[in-house]
Amino acid sequence: MRALTSIEHLTTDELLYLVKRARQLKAGSPPQVKDGLVAANLFFEPSTRTKMSFEMAERKLGLTVLPFEAGFSSATKGESLYDTVKTLEAIGVDVLVIRHPENNYYEPIIDQVKPVIINGGDGTGNHPTQSLLDLMTMLEEFETLEGKTVTIVGDLAHSRVARSNVHVLSKLGAQIQFVSPPEWQAEFQVLFSLDEAIETSDVIMLLRVQHERHDGTQSFTKEQYHEEYGLTEARMAAMKDNAIVLHPAPFNRGVEIADAVVEGDKSRIFEQMKNGVYMRMAILEFLLKEEAE
Amino acid sequence: MRALTSIEHLTTDELLYLVKRARQLKAGSPPQVKDGLVAANLFFEPSTRTKMSFEMAERKLGLTVLPFEAGFSSATKGESLYDTVKTLEAIGVDVLVIRHPENNYYEPIIDQVKPVIINGGDGTGNHPTQSLLDLMTMLEEFETLEGKTVTIVGDLAHSRVARSNVHVLSKLGAQIQFVSPPEWQAEFQVLFSLDEAIETSDVIMLLRVQHERHDGTQSFTKEQYHEEYGLTEARMAAMKDNAIVLHPAPFNRGVEIADAVVEGDKSRIFEQMKNGVYMRMAILEFLLKEEAE
Amino acid sequence: MRALTSIEHLTTDELLYLVKRARQLKAGSPPQVKDGLVAANLFFEPSTRTKMSFEMAERKLGLTVLPFEAGFSSATKGESLYDTVKTLEAIGVDVLVIRHPENNYYEPIIDQVKPVIINGGDGTGNHPTQSLLDLMTMLEEFETLEGKTVTIVGDLAHSRVARSNVHVLSKLGAQIQFVSPPEWQAEFQVLFSLDEAIETSDVIMLLRVQHERHDGTQSFTKEQYHEEYGLTEARMAAMKDNAIVLHPAPFNRGVEIADAVVEGDKSRIFEQMKNGVYMRMAILEFLLKEEAE
């Protein structure tokens, strides 16, 4: 395999292998990557978590990381992504992590270039490494997702995370339900209110209210969103005993999640960030090992 | 100690230890930092000197440094500094150097997070590593500051450096006097003109005229400032034989300091920059050693 | 030698040594650079290729590379390039690669500072490392340039590459001819159309149409440029059997070069990028070795 662009391309065996391997790396297993490999992270959209997480994972694997500033590259001279990637290939880069605002930006690239490509998020499309770290975090909590109920809450229409997760969660036997304001439901069927969904959920997966992608035409204020769709302290108290809360972050305290819930005992939000580093190490190791064979 | 936010929190013993240790490191003493530690430098204001100096110090100590672009981080999505820092903690960062335009930005953070925090400058408040490198440079010249006279010249009102230095210099027995135009005197008492102060000073500590923070309402031009408050060649010649000139830089040649004085024989400006690397190594080593205990 | 600012300062022996050494490094010869040296790349203009190529070369040589963000440095506070460089010298940087929009920006710096200076491109002036990697790529193809014909096509007036290459190619015995629209001919004498030049050329060296430097007053559209001055597939087919195509990139597909020609069998464009890393390693090694003596 030369690329991870969408989680839908992974088999169940591959998904479970990556979770197992990430947990081994978290437990201290030494990484298996050959010496002298070079990575570059091409982030054409702002990011702290995903970019820093990859930067850390790459260094923990012993990769050399070349700095790339999207806002100061030849992309500003109109160079296409394909030509930028071919350039980095010629310079000797072995693996590229790319975040880009266009859906499926990677299609003209994969199979055309030598470096391994990892999709760090494309437009409103895929974000496979986030889905994998979410999966790892759920499987740390529950032996299996078979028969578990996962509720995805929020802006389904603009979420890179929702679509990827629906696919992988169903594959692993979870029940998925959705809660969302009408204007953000997209193709998803919303059957419950958050209060109803809380009672039956093992996982509440909150999505970010993405202020920067919206046009200001929503029919609700932040306060109204919090009241109807936010995970308040009262709602957290109504959750099942072993249920957990996930959020891909950055989160908006007081909008989709109450301040105290972020650090509450059901929250696995910071554990997700921690797991992200190990999952990305597992992914890089996996793709670069195939590479070497 | 988990943080260095203000020099006022350091005891005299700690101040003198850090100077001694920085001088040892400058003389070639090997640094004592355990392997595998990770640093990130969060600069929310432009800086060459302080940021590059920390970047160098961290590498000389063998730390892994994760790149962080403030202008391209989730801070642009409205993430609070606290949440950014919690994210970096989860990702595995051990030490954070932060420069931020708000005074006391660090208060909601320290004691709430695991990484060591070093203040790289906050608003018009503290800049403890600058004060320490100034101190190191003075103590390389004089055995003690007891009985020495230090004159601080310039924009006292907007200076991060002036306030920190006043505290530490008094503690170590120096006499401090101020020279400043009326609109920049703030709470400081100005008793002398620069010409009078020159005669009795062992150290002339110039402050930067910070054009970018001013509103253009000052009552003087650059030329007038230079004439009344600038360190001209004539004034340098009037200084005591062993007296020295300090400036935290970046300096404005022809405004607070004459061109030729920057490279003149009384200037320790480039020595300050050099010492900055060793002082920051000493501080990092000190905080990360406590950490390990 | 403490600097490489213009290729015109290199003797023929030095030129040929650098090509030989770069080819050795490409073949796997271990680099010869002492430990503990520090580099910084000061790019005051956007660049992917040249900056990434230097970043890679520096790491392959084992240098420590300090990150420098021009748009977030003290240069934004009005600091002169000389003072920025003196700062980096004080902090302990051994080699600086600089790209700057002003012609001859380096004149006030070289001979005044300790770090080795490598010109990564200045205004419309010099770009010596590009000329050297072009030379390397030509000498990989032909034993010698004696008697070979090189045609330089395009925007001669704004090209950093054209001027440097004319000098070095003549020195090594090549015949040089020019093809350019009237408004971009500058001091160069244009004797042929591209169709005439094709027949006699061993090397077609295309220059970039630099949209971002132009004022929109050209008398031709992109399509017209392509028709008259672009390397189309038909023109590629008319080239001599062993002739090759060079382009410093980033290239504009469909303007100065047809899409299919970029990846065509006469194109050495990606090989140039690859060679760039080894040539920059050779240059760094050469300058830092002299340094050590």
Image (tube, coloured by chain):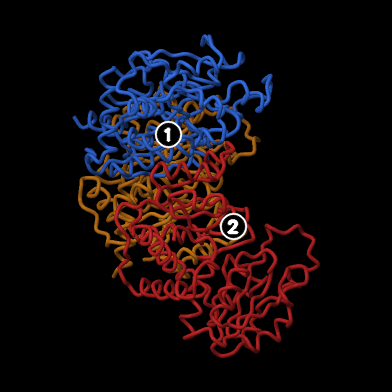
Chain colours: A orange, B blue, C red
Numbered disc 2: secondary structure: strand
Q: Which mark is residue A279?
A: none
- Tag nearer the camera, 1 or 2: 2
Percent x, y for residue B261?
52, 33
Picture residue at 48% right of the left edge, 39% below the top: B48
Res. A227 visible in picture: no
C241, above or below A156, in the image: below
Q: Which residue is mark 1?
A: B84
Q: Is residue A190 left or right of residue A280?
A: right
Of A286 and C213, nearer the camera is C213
Q: Chain of mark 1?
A: B
Percent x, y for residue B286?
26, 30
Of B60 and B224, nearer the camera is B224
Q: Chain of mark 2?
A: C
Judged from this view, the residue extending furthest toward the left is B293
Q: Which residue is mark 2?
A: C122
Percent x, y for residue B167?
39, 15
Numbered disc 1: secondary structure: helix
Q: Is residue A166 left or right of residue C230?
A: left
Amino acid marked by disc 1: Thr
> Contact, CB < 8 Å: mark 1 with mark 2?
no
